[in-house]
Amino acid sequence: MADQSAAVQVVASIGDSGAELLDRVFFALSDPVRRSILNRLDQGTLLVSELAAPFAISLQAVSRHIQVLARAGLVRQQRSGRVSRCSLETGPIFAAAVWINRYSKYWQAQFDLLAMTLEDLEPANQPSKTEKETEP
């Protein structure tokens, strides 16, 4: 429930002032390692060392990726001494999805046109009644 209220606040901030947020989110999502980190955090909170385990890069490199995600608001880091736990924050992803969805009207029109074209082609591709009757 807290993620939903955070998402509403993030969406409300989109506009000219939200452009920087979107820039950080899209930049963070542009890297396959960072997307993989987010996928792993979707399962729950993990230690940085647990996040780094499957990657063939240094712990320091993974930490830098986590910092990019944290600056975009996609990851929350909680430190206790030398131990750092990371959790997923979905608000900025929701905000980016809302922003992208604003442009769905453009591709939806293309899907509608494709559907109409396919409907027009259907009768031409189906055999006529007399052809069906003469088939063996």
Image: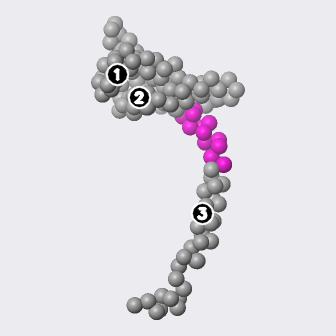
Residue 112 visible in the snapshot: yes
Q: Which residue is mark 3?
A: 115
Q: Position of residue 5 (x, y in %)?
A: 54, 29
Q: Position of residue 98 (x, y in %)?
A: 59, 37
Residue 5 visible in the snapshot: no
Q: Secondary structure at mark 1?
A: loop
Q: Position of residue 71 (x, y in %)?
A: 52, 19
User: In the rendered image of this protein, does residue 119 appear above or below residue 43?
Assistant: below
Q: Which residue is mark 1?
A: 57
Q: Residue at x 54, y 27 (%)?
A: 27
| CA–CA distance in space, label 1 to label 2 | 10 Å
Q: Residue furthest top?
A: 81
Q: Which image quarter: residue 54?
A: top left
Does residue 115 appear to the left or right of 80 in the view shown?
A: right
Q: Secondary structure at mark 3?
A: helix
Q: Tell us which disc is closer to us: 1 or 2.
A: 1
Q: Position of residue 13 (x, y in %)?
A: 64, 26
Q: Which residue is mark 2?
A: 33
Q: Callout 2: 10 Å neighbours few (<14), some, many (20+)?
A: some
Does residue 44 appear to the left or right of 130 in the view shown?
A: left
Q: Residue at x 36, y 31 (%)?
A: 40
Q: Which residues are magenta?
A: 94-106
Kind of residue indicated by mark 3: Ala
User: In the rendered image of this protein, does residue 125 appear above or below residue 72?
Assistant: below
| CA–CA distance in space, label 1 to label 3 | 46 Å
Between discs 1 and 3, the one toward the N terminus: 1
Q: Residue at x 52, y 82 (%)?
A: 127
Q: Callout 3: 10 Å neighbours few (<14), some, many (20+)?
A: few
